[in-house]
Amino acid sequence: MKNITVIGSGTMGNGIAHTFAQNGFKVALIDISSESLTIAMQNIAANLDRQIKKGAIDESAKKATLENISTYTDIKEGAVDADLVVEAATENREIKLNLFKQLSGICNDKAILASNTSSISITQIASVTKNPANVIGMHFMNPVPVMKLVEVIRGYATSDEVTTTIMNLSRQLGKDPVEVNDYPGFVANRILIPMINEAIYTLYEGVAGVEEIDTVMKLGMAHPMGPLQLADFIGLDVCLAILKVLYDGFGNQKYAACPLLVNMVAAGHLGAKSGSGFYTYTPGSKDITVAAKFLTKR
């Protein structure tokens, strides 16, 4: 497996491209926006510079990594020679189904089609392709170059051979793969997102403030980041989308999104990427402050 195609150049997509390229793979990074691709390459270069400052790599490794990545706005041009495609587009079922249907007609029959989805059914995604046995979930964690876990999700039809290939490939990337089965939210988000939702309810009901909730979880449960700050970094819109998948999949009220989360997303307060969520964020700075207007029940 030599040629990797990554679809989507956002935070996850450029992190996945960075990781494969740094490990010697040729990567085709695809996005519908040439501007987004330019920003993605700038972000990859900046992240490589951080690795240089930490002594993890040298300038020659940075140069080799960047040379391993080619960018495309045409999906056919970027995916036609792929041995593996990793889709990292928006967490939207219809977008993903449409992409995999296209990929099934573009890629060769032996190509493995993987999705970085954090919650959407791999079985359903595979159902629109010509070869469901070659479809699998490859859920990386953010930031991809740093985080060790890859959640490998088997769809109903995913073959043993494809699963073994992806498990071994993940290890080649220096990751620790964990195989899970295809149920809503898989393991990571089935546990994490309801915890985040409960933290939002705790704020919404006035039990404690943003910093207090996060401090309890950091100091009391040894979490490196509080659930509300983590939600900001995941993206509140992404958290809401995953909760909808869980609610639709299980039909259980415990997965119903907190009204505060729904309102914040509707208002465009999506977390770090929009500059405001449970905290406010200053571009280019690590400083954050509590967004005080969200401290009371609304």
Image (cartoon, rainbow, N blue to C red):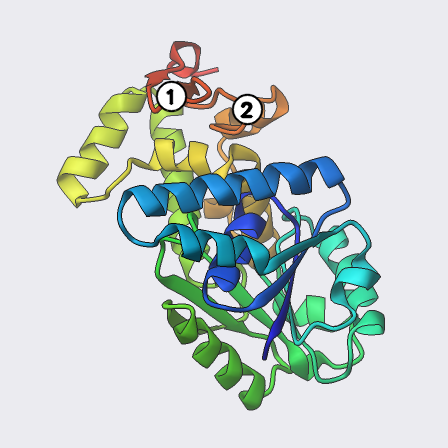
- Disc 1 is placed on an element classified as loop
Q: Residues within 10 Å of mark 2 (few under 14, many from 20)?
A: some
Q: Residue 118: x percent and y percent?
A: 53, 55
Which quarter of the rendered picture does the N terminus lie within?
Answer: bottom right
Residue 134 lies in quadrant: bottom right
Q: Residue 174: x percent and y percent?
A: 36, 68
Distance between the Cα atoms at labels 2 and 1? Answer: 14 Å
- Name the residue rendered at 34%, 29% in the picture: 202
Q: Mark 2 or 1, which is nearer the eye?
A: 1
Q: Nearer the viewer, residue 269 or 1?
A: 1
Q: Provide the residue designation for mark 2.
A: 274
Q: Nearer the viewer, residue 20 or 127?
A: 20
Q: Is residue 141 visible?
A: no
Amino acid at circle 1 = Ser
Amino acid at circle 2 = Ser
Q: Residue 97: x percent and y percent?
A: 76, 60
Q: Provide the residue designation for mark 1.
A: 285
- Name the residue rendered at 57%, 23% in the picture: 263
Q: Nearer the viewer, residue 257 or 270?
A: 270
- Name the residue rendered at 75%, 61% in the picture: 78
Q: Is residue 133 above or below residue 91?
A: below
Q: Nearer the viewer, residue 42 or 262?
A: 42
